[in-house]
Image (cartoon, helix red, strand yellow):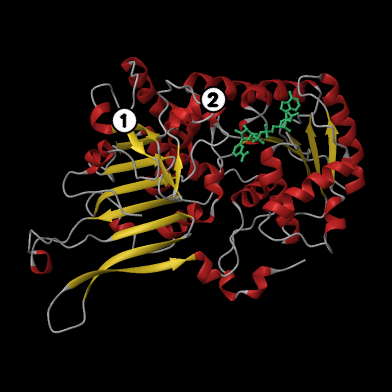
Amino acid sequence: MSDSASHNPLRTGLEEAQVAQPCTLVIFGGGGDLSRRKLLPAIYNQVIDGALPANFAVLGVAREELDDASYREFAREGIERFSRQSLDPRHWPDFERVLHFEQGAFDDADTYARLKKRLEEIEPAFGIPGNRVFYLAIPPALIETCVQHLNAAGLVQPVGVDVPFSRIIVEKPIGRDLQSARQVNNILGSNFDESQIFRIDHYLGKETVQNILAMRFGNSIFEPLWNAKHIDHVQITVAEEEGVGTRAGYYDRAGALRDMVQNHILQLLTLIAMEPPWAMKADVIRDHRQDVLNCMRPITPDTIDSSVVRAQYGPGFHHGEDVPGYRRESGVAQDSTTETYVALKVYVDNWRWAGVPFYIRTGKRMPKRVSEIAVYFKSVPPILFNADADHPLEPNVLALNIQPNEGLSLRIATKLPGPKVRIYPVKMDFRYGSTFGDQSPEAYERLLLDVMAGDATLFMRRDTVEASWMFIEDILESWGSSHTRWLPEYSAGTWGPLEADRLIESKRRKWRLL
Ligand SMILES: NC(=O)c1ccc[n+]([C@@H]2O[C@H](COP(=O)([O-])OP(=O)(O)OC[C@H]3O[C@@H](n4cnc5c(N)ncnc54)[C@H](OP(=O)(O)O)[C@@H]3O)[C@@H](O)[C@H]2O)c1
């Protein structure tokens, strides 16, 4: 198997020990889209990279009519299409023998009895000491059924010293509002200990997102400037090129605020705004992220109009082709008032961030797919090079590119060569791809490994999920009481409605051109 780390000296660095323990990964929904596109390819890459223990097996469970042989074919097809590293026929026979499948319905107690029997066969055959990770890659409505059946079938081991571990991974979304999120958390909490529950938000597994902590706390130059005295504002953009596609059934009930802001974007914000943690320990980091959520200023009916803009894409162009507006998409109600775009101005009311606005925007059918956090520093005083009020200097901007061109850049002012004194903004650029060569591991690779190692740093704790919903719920309630029948429109293929420009256009601020 390849050892990419040894080929690139830049890849050696300070290492945090990360040891995945022998276990069986039981994937509920093992025959679904997430498994085919993400989970099975992630496992394949980990095996190829030698990151998984030798004592490891996978057991897919779902209704599809599959057996071990046809599940291996299903996995092969997914890996051939979606894996970061191409399928290597030399390693395939070794890899495929770890894959197993058990057919069954999740609401049938028999399924769990057969599952138990299969596990009791697989574990001794692979030298696995009874450790189990249950991955719920299933529709959210089935979480309760699965969790209760797992426990009733005696498949959940209580936490203890020298006993095999049982861990559960739950996919987003956790609920669709505070009340339903609490319900899911109550069900999980009454069958598993919080330390056994891993609520996944794959955004947190991206290299660039993890690099936020390394950049902030591994360098001495940023932290002294990281506060309201030196930072003017922060912009977070998560733009998608795609329209609603085949996800209308889910999306039309969710919208951009629930789909993107409640989880991914608020998590990014907490990483940017958190205080320095005193240890790289899961609960220390999660406590500090939680503190940020706790001091976010609530958006009330009085402030909603000056803080939030929502809109829907209308007809427009995508890659030179006409595309329909949101209400004309298949599966979307013709009178839908679901937002496909939202922009927010939010504040973190603590000493560090007092008065610094965080501008957030996210939408579908934007001109390109890009996720970026841009930290705008305050302008230099209006003296010397910045004395001409009609031609102010561009401020310094630190941009963290999360996708697709992972990296970071710093905009600084320099003198243009020549006899005149003319100042020009240039960019210092770092790109993961060009510096480190290899493709970065997919988020799911890192996150699966973390679960097997018992490291919950990059997973959402119960209080985090609920605090995010609490913040979002104020906005949802204001929207609910406004009985809107029509949202502002932006043409597909543009950066959103004019109303969003007005949200930011004060004190010479404007949305970053991406
Ligand atoms: N797909 C992604 O890229 C993605 C990304 C992020 C999060 N997620 C989340 O991951 C979860 C799974 O998504 P998905 O896209 O993989 O869904 P999916 O393609 O619909 O797969 C669901 C799987 O569960 C099985 N299943 C459903 N009901 C069942 C039942 N009652 N008994 C037994 N098996 C049953 C399905 O089998 P049948 O085909 O027989 O129904 C299928 O194998 C969802 O919560 C989603 O929000 C998905």
**301 or 165, nearer to the observer:** 301
Q: Is residue 330 above or below residue 280?
A: above
> Which residue lies under the disc numbered 2?
175
* Front in this rendered view, residue 267 or 107: 107
Question: Mark 1 or mark 2: which is in front?
Answer: 1
Place of residue 383 in the rendered image (x, y in percent of width and height, measured from the top left): 8, 65
In the picture, measured across the screen, residue 162 lies left or right of residue 453, that is right
Give ligand 1's quarter of the image.
top right
Q: Amino acid at mark 2?
A: Gly
Q: Are marks 1 and 2 in contact (CB under 8 Å)?
A: no
Q: Assess disc 2: are there few (<14), some (14-19) or many (≥20) residues with their C-alpha within 10 Å of its C-alpha.
A: some
Amino acid type at mark 1: Pro
Whole-percent x and y of residue 203? Answer: 52, 45
Mark sitting earlier along the chain (1/2): 2
Residue 89: horizontal and vertical position, in percent?
83, 62
Labelled disc at residue 488: 1
Rounded to the nearest whole Å, what is the CA distance between mark 1 and mark 2? 27 Å
Q: Is residue 230 left or right of residue 495?
A: left
Q: Can the viewer see residue 4?
A: yes
The percent position of residue 78, horizontal first and vertical second, equals 73, 48
Rendered image quadrant of residue 472:
top left
Q: Which residue is at 61% across, 53% downward?
A: 442
**Residue 392 sits above or below residue 165 on the image:** below
For the question of whether residue 43 can be seen, the reply is no
Mark 1 neighbour density, 10 Å: few (under 14) some (14–19) many (20 or more): some
In-image side of 132 versus 16 (left or right)? right
Report the residue at 83% width, 47% height from top: 73
**Residue that protrudes farthest toward the bottom in the picture:** 419
Element type at marker 1?
loop
Residue drawn where x is 78% and y is 40% of the image? 131
